[in-house]
Amino acid sequence: MTSVERPAAAAPSPDDSLRGWLAEHSAGLIALRRNIHAHPELSGAEHATTELVRERLELAGLTPRIFAIGTGLACDLRPDGADGRPVLALRADLDALAMDDEKDVPYRSQVAGASHACGHDVHTAVVLGTAMYFANHRDELPGPLRLLFQPAEERVPGGALDVIADGGLDGVDAIVGVHCEPKLDVGVIGVKSGSISSAADMLEIRLSGPGGHTARPELTVNLLAVAARVVAELPQRVADALELGDEVKLVFGSVHGGDAANVIPTNCVLRASVRTPTLAVWEGLPRLVERIIGELLADTGAGFEVDYTHGVPPVVNDGQITDVVRRAATGEFGPDAVVPVAQSWGGDDFAWLLREVPGSYVRLGVHDTGRPGEYLDLHVGHFDVDERAIALGVRLLVATVREYFATPA
């Protein structure tokens, strides 16, 4: 009998390869996310989370470097012959929020007063999954990557500054990050060129006066009445001082003064957050706010000190990099899955990274479509995600990497 040579089986396409890998590893990425979720660590204390990520990267054959501050890490992944190619960074954040986890789930936080209520555990799983995929499919890696697992995003002014100071962006040409968006259904990707988040600053005003008896407020400076005037009038005065079309949100969250009902106090401390989506407004706010406070208190007789602390600037997405992400997401999920998103009044220290290199911050839909109408928010005790978003996030970043290196410079 004559033997017949059978043609060699065709190698799987990159898309088939990724889907096959995710079919095998998605459960592990979900388990990793749940591990991090159950053991949250606050800003600057992400030691166990850093070690977990380091261990997974090393098991994938990579060589991560822990940042000098002791938490967070960077890891390079380069194909052969990549010298001279632009470097794309992918960023995740590691820290949790200082709040309780109120969910009744097996992976609920085991640490009182700490919770992953902003999705950083998901971001970490997505970027780690992307790194593990390319580490196991080096032949598919189209160019050099820098994986950044950043500490202390929730701490002002943010751990991104530590990443920059430690050389985390040295040699990087562009950067992409993902952030969970509970207002978008799982499977939906939100993109926006230009400013996508707002600057987030802190304001503290310390008022002082001679004090006195509440029976005779006319003989002294009624400090709490002055504080009430500041709370009631300062936000609108600052807003009115801006150019038409510019916006600001100055909102007081803390007023402390006095202990007894019949004593006018000698000191009062007011604290507020100050937010704006506009970079030029952010840069001028400290001077503007202090000037208006002086005008507001000029006839009150109260002494005052103003401590205005710049937090983070707005996140300003680069148009070209955002177009890369948009094309990648459209090709991977279809045009109906890619939507524009509105400007957020929240802040994120990804902004510091974008002041160094062009990049884009992308919204990853995490709302469980099996719960219509139950659109949660970030920073709430019962925050959770549809964990299918992890595999979808890996697909998004892998597609973005391919599109970035396929795009002519």
Image: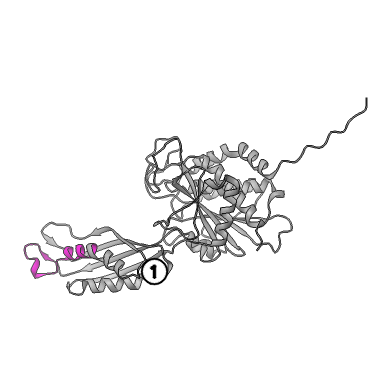
Image quadrant holding the N terminus, namely top right
The three-letter code of the residue at mark 1 reads Val
When the figure is inspected, residue 149 is found, relative to residue 108, above or below; the finding is below
Residue drawn at the location 53% of the way across and 64% of the way down = 164
Compare residues 335 and 363 and report the one nearer the observer.
Answer: 335
**Residue 68 appears anywhere in the view:** yes
Compare residues 156 and 385 and report the one nearer the observer.
Answer: 385
Residue drawn at the location 68% of the way across and 62% of the way down = 85
Q: Quadrant of residue 252?
A: bottom left
Image quadrant holding the C terminus, namely bottom right
- Give the crowd class for mark 1: few <14, some 14-19, many >=20 residues within 10 Å: some
Magenta stretch containing residue 15, yes or no?
no
**Location of residue 60 in the rendering, given as x and y in whole percent from the top left corner:** 65, 46
Name the side, left or right, on which 375 lies relative to 188. Answer: left
Q: What residue span does the magenta drawing correspond to?
A: 211-231
Residue carrying label 1: 281
Residue drawn at the location 56% of the way across and 64% of the way down = 357
Residue at the limit of the structure toward the front, as seen here? 336
**Location of residue 190 in the rendering, given as x and y in whole percent from the top left corner:** 49, 51
Magenta stretch containing residue 229, yes or no?
yes
Name the side, left or right, on which 139 lies relative to 121. Answer: right
**Location of residue 354 in the rendering, given as x and y in whole percent from the top left corner:** 52, 63
Residue at the limit of the structure toward the right, as seen here? 1
Q: Quadrant of residue 84?
A: bottom right
Compare residues 139 and 49 and report the one nearer the observer.
Answer: 139
Q: Quadrant of residue 22?
A: top right
When the figure is inspected, residue 367 is found, relative to residue 229, above or below; the finding is above
**Residue 66 appears anywhere in the view:** no
